[in-house]
Amino acid sequence: MKNFNKVIAAAVGTLMLAACHNEDVTPGGASIQDMARFSATIAGPVTRAYDTSWDADDEIGISGTSGEVQYTNVCYYFTSGSKGNFSPKDESKKIYFQDNNEVTFTAYYPWNDLKGSTTITADTWGQAEQKQFDFLWAQKKGSKAAPDVAFRFAHKMAKVVLTVKCGADVSYDEVKAAVLTLDGFKHGGSFNVTTGTAEATGNESTMWEFANNAETEVYNAPFKYDDAKQTVSYTLILFPQTFEAALPFTAELTGKQSFTADLNFTEANAEIDKADAKNEWVAGRQYNMGIVLNKTGIEVEGCTIAPWEEVPGGDFSAE
């Protein structure tokens, strides 16, 4: 009986060791201690254009090659209720360091099923769906010796904030109800997740109504009322691009009374680019422009650039 008990004890011990071994080693041979740990910040006055924090199930794509293992467009998602933690959507695709060499990781937002491609196409006319094309990108190195990979995401689109104000003989209600149109820019484009480049393509916009568009509501941009100042601010996310001429802006007030003004961004860019400034939207810049509606016409108050500051963007953990 004593010998039998010894055999049983030995067998149990062997099974326990095997279980521990299976828990500590990944299918590729890397141990759990070799996992990459990702964290991130995002450049911007808020984390994204449409809100101030990550939403539940927000997804990013991470790529990198370690040893003979190539991680491509691995999807990590935000876990609701966590302290900024992201988890791999597919547990079998967790990211590990396979050897002691340094690895360069790239990451982008929002994650897309690229199906072997490296680009995402978008149409910015649909401003109600900014979440689909508020592209962010980051690159950072990591290794077994330094497994904490701190991404700093950068905005790759341009943001234009138009604050519409009451002028002579124009009421606040008329400002809120005004149908606004912007022309002369390319609304289509693509985003390369490998290089982080956003590029405008296609034809220029004509008669694009981005405020109070009753026929195509998806074109309506996010807006904010300021009742104290009696203003309405519209936030547009657009592809970076250069213009040959000023952009026509039109406001149609109640009663079908319309006025047009030209918007030029050269002076705003001169704050940073000095003599090299152009009439363009530069990636990562926010353009703030005040527009006063009068019964006799539109007054453009000028345009300034607001830097997109760094704010916490959450932690990404690979386990």
Image (cartoon, rainbow, N blue to C red):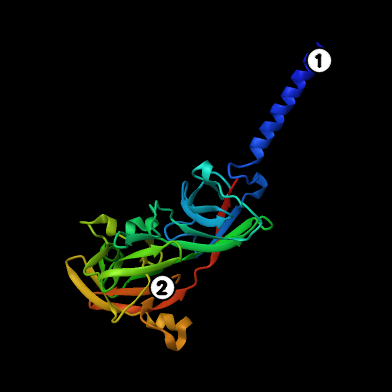
- Give the labeled residue for mark 2: 287
* On-image quarter of the C terminus: top right
Residue in the foreground of this view, choosing between 312 and 115: 115
Residue type, numbered disc 2: Tyr
Residue 3, labelled with which disc? 1
Query: Is residue 157 at least partly visible in the picture?
Result: no
User: Furthest-right residue in view?
Assistant: 2
Left or right: 185 as drawn, with respect to 99: left
Most extreme residue toward the bottom, as rendered? 275
For residue 97, side relative to residue 108 (left or right): right
The quarter of the displayed image where residue 216 is located:
bottom left
Residue projecting furthest to the top: 1
Q: Give the camera-side residue of 300 and 190.
A: 190
Q: Is residue 306 visible?
A: yes
Q: Nearer the viewer, mark 2 or mark 1?
A: 1
Q: Position of residue 106 (x, y in %)?
A: 51, 60
Query: The residue tagged with tag 1: helix, strand or loop?
Result: helix
The spot of residue 253 in percent (x, y) is 22, 67
Q: Earlier in the sequence, mark 2 or mark 1?
A: 1
Q: Position of residue 271 (x, y in %)?
A: 46, 82
Query: Quick one: 120 or 44, which is closer to the camera?
Result: 120
The quarter of the rendered structure image containing the N terminus is top right
Give the distance between the C-alpha atoms of the residues marked 2 and 1, in whole angstroms: 82 Å
Residue 154 locus on image (x, y percent): 49, 65
Callout 1, which amino acid?
Asn
Q: Secondary structure at mark 2?
A: strand
For label 2, the crowd category at 10 Å Cα-Cα, with few meaning under 14, some 14 to 19 and many 20 or more, is: many
Q: Residue at horizontal 34%, vertical 60%?
A: 121
The part of the image, by quadrant, that contains residue 286 is: bottom left
Q: Residues within 10 Å of mark 1 (few under 14, many from 20)?
A: few
In the rendered image of this protein, does residue 84 appear above or below residue 14? Answer: below
